[in-house]
Image (cartoon, rainbow, N blue to C red):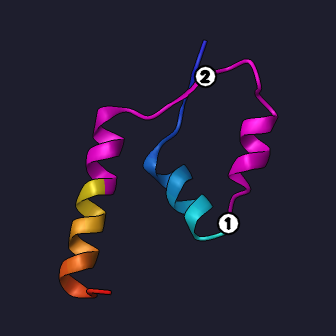
């Protein structure tokens, strides 16, 4: 069995609202995966951010 991480989980971890290492440690035998749509959402969000707020 595996655990799929949704974009909302990854965003919460990035914003400091979720302790992702603790979550991963709580399930050492389960693989964590992201769906293709989640990867696409994250890439789209990064592209939008770069256009509106270049670093």
Q: From the viewer's perspective, tell me whether residue 47 is left or right of residue 1.
A: left
User: Which-is-in-front pick, marks 2 and 1?
Assistant: 2
Q: How crowded is mark 2: few (under 14 residues within 10 Å), some or many (20 or more)?
A: few
User: Residue drawn 32% across and 87% down?
Assistant: 55
Q: Position of residue 5 (x, y in %)?
A: 52, 38
Q: Residues within 10 Å of mark 1 (few under 14, many from 20)?
A: few
| Secondary structure type for disc 2 | loop
| Residue 46, image quadrant | bottom left
User: Residue drawn 24% across and 77% down?
Assistant: 50
Q: Is residue 15 above or below residue 52?
A: above
| Comes first in the chain, label 2 or label 1 | 1
Q: Mark 1 points at which residue?
A: 17
Q: Mark 2 points at which residue?
A: 31
Q: Is residue 18 within the magenta segment?
A: yes
In the foreground, 6 or 39: 39
Q: From the viewer's perspective, tell me whether residue 28 is left or right of residue 47.
A: right
Q: In this view, does 45 lie above or below 27?
A: below
The segment highlighted magenta reads 17-42
């Amino acid at each position: 069995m595996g655990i799929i991480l949704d974009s909302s989980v990854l965003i919460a971890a990035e914003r400091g609202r979720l302790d992702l290492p603790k979550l991963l440690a709580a399930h050492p035998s389960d693989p964590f995966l992201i769906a293709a749509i989640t990867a696409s959402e994250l890439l789209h969000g990064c592209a939008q951010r770069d256009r509106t707020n270049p670093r």
